[in-house]
Image (cartoon, coloured by chain):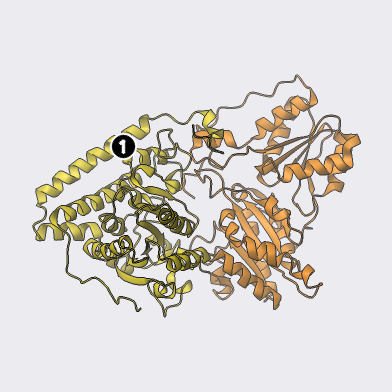
Amino acid sequence: MSRLITFVEALREAQAQCLETDPRVYLLGLCAPGPTGIFGSTSGLAERFGTDRVIDMPASENGMTGIALGTSVVGMRPIMIHMRMDFAVLSMEPLVNQAAKWHYMYGGRMRAPLTVRMIVGRGWGQGPQHSQSLQSWFAHIPGLKVVMPTTPYDAKGMLIAAVEDDAPVIIVEHRWLYAIKGEVPSEMYRVPLDKARIARPGRDITLAATSHMTLECLHAAELLQQAGVNAEVIDLRSLTPIDSDTLDASLRRTGHLIVADTSHESFGVGAEVLACATERSFTALKAPPKRMGLPFVPTPTTPALADLYYPRGIDIAGAALKMLGSTATLPPQPKGPRWLDVPNPEFTGPY
Amino acid sequence: MTESSTRPKSGAVADKATRRAMFTSLLRIRMVEEEIARRYSEQEMRCPTHLCTGQEGAPAGVSAHLTRDDHVFSMHRSHGHYLAKGGDLDGMIAEIYGKATGCAGGKGGSQHLIDTGCGFMGSAPILASTIPVGVGAAWGSVMRGEQRVVVIYFGDGATEEGAFHEAMNFAGVRKLPVVFVCENNLYSVHSTLEVRQPASRTIAQMGPMHGMEGLSGDGNDVDEVWRLAGYAVEKARQGGGPTILELFTYRWLEHCGPMEDIKLRYRSQEEFDSWLARDPVAQYRRRMIADGVLTAPDVEAITGDIAAEIERAFAHAKASPFPLPAALTEHVYPEPVR
């Protein structure tokens, strides 16, 4: 049975079903059993499964990641949760040097089935240390799998697939997706960890995106439609690898590419996708492809600067028209709220 | 070396002028936080804001021993540390409002206050992240032959991070002039101490393991904080090396934001009430009057002065301009100093 639920409900349901069906699974995170349940993503799970399986932890990201790895090598299946990806920076050693390599460097004799959920913040002054989107750091490391679900359907299916995968998997969750609703089956299902998804078919230009930027690209596609341009939107979903089959097939239809990522443009997912496109689909490209992401600047806290920092659908649509050499004009934008630093109008801060 | 082996004698108190200054500092921090909480719902302070209401005792008592040249490093709940060290109030409020006149030009917000002019060297919300930096500032000062004590504030949660132990170890190795001040408010966000640290040892007891004394005391009793900090700061100044102080205190409001949060039930009403009864400000006000340091009219006059100062700071913040768009790309890399 399928019904309309939010991204955060999909995450919670995926974890509940993993806990229910597999006694090896446990959740570990600061305040995971707490009253606000990590932005609601673990709410009620401690009451249902107990604090032996939905486990609070010291503020020791480095040590606790190694400890979680230790439990996984003796057969447990931990889901570790970082309320903000910026805190996962403290756990780089056990993730990068250890978990990523234990299968390879021990000649296949070790498995580290560790799932790490990392939440990317945005808005309400999250600023330089509470809003980083560091997926390309992890995607650079062989042995780690990195996925970025956008829809509630993928959030549930990819989280379940991650828990069942024998490799360490990092799930990057954008906080601004949490309230998004979508159709989600109530039963358990898996979404592959290595395939992109065509979010909107089109023929004139390919907009390939990660996570929340997929929504911005869908908005851009609507604006472009009104300007007579038919854009295809690809939700990349997986970074390891980038699904270059889907990308190449799209580019052979459209000949144009804009990549929109939640992180900085340089040395990031955008750069990698452009490399894939030019290496494999060069002859299909009719114009130089383009990256869109954050400027090479830390996140400013004040909304006066943060509003300039994040590219939006209108910016992507404008860039698409420019790439296509189109003189069409985009529909006028309705006047929005003064600041663009909240995911929805009901939000009154703080996180 | 055991805990409390050289603990300063209880009973000693500061001179009247110092106690008056500590009371003013305490009250000022309280009133600033209350005004932020009152105005936060206007949605003009658009950044995560961790108020220190209830925890004013530590900064008021510690800073009484610090000179302008001494350094303070802090964490997410930094307003009290900043103000007690002499941080500019206008700059702090404007920073929380995201204005160009803020102490970090609006780029940092409440979590990244700074005022190098008074020796407040920065604050950051990643747990324990400023502890090694503070130790480095002390070490660098020694390298440069500068006389300086460095105070590093952090919470109980930060002592669970590896960086805390690594920095403590090195400070112990080098006998650096550092005072580690742990404000133990019993919770990391909503997680109780019991699920995070062994019940059989205190945070102060970790001092001797890293080659330094560890003292603990009531962080809501400013005179006690003053005694403990006086001992630790003076020892550091005289080349006696670092100390860790564990000061017990309690956060009155939610982890982040202006509201009370008893309704979340991660802590009990009884516990909350017992700490409210040990309000550092009210306790000290009573004691100041009982000891004849201040009269009720004195307190009223101080309150009026602070209220006027706070009103000016908010007016300044509200009237200040936002940073211009060009500021977005400024400061990624430093310009050469001419």
Image coords of residue B236 (percent x, y) = 33, 62
The shade of chain A is orange
Name the outermost residue toward the bottom: B200
Q: Residue at coordinates 29% horizontally, 54% vertically from top-left? A: B66
Left or right, B124 with reference to A245: left
Total numbered badges shown on the rendered structure: 1
Chain identifier for the yellow-coloured part of the image: B
Above or below, B245 against A184 in this view is below
Image coords of residue B311 (percent x, y) = 27, 37
**Viewer-nearest residue: B213 or A295:** B213
Does residue A313 appear in this view? yes
Q: Residue at coordinates 29% horizontally, 77% vertically from top-left? A: B5
Residue at numbered disc 1: B313
Does residue A6 appear in this view? no
Letter of the chain that mark 1 sits on in the rendering: B
**Viewer-nearest residue: A266 or B233:** B233
Circle 1: element type: helix
Give the class, few, some or many, for how many residues have Cα within 10 Å of label 1's Cα (few <14, many ≥20): many
Left or right, A200 with reference to B295: right
User: What's under tag 1, amino acid-wise?
Assistant: Ala
Image quadrant holding the N terminus of chain A, namely bottom right
Name the outermost residue toward the top: A327
Image coords of residue A325 (percent x, y) = 79, 22
**Viewer-nearest residue: B193 or B226:** B226
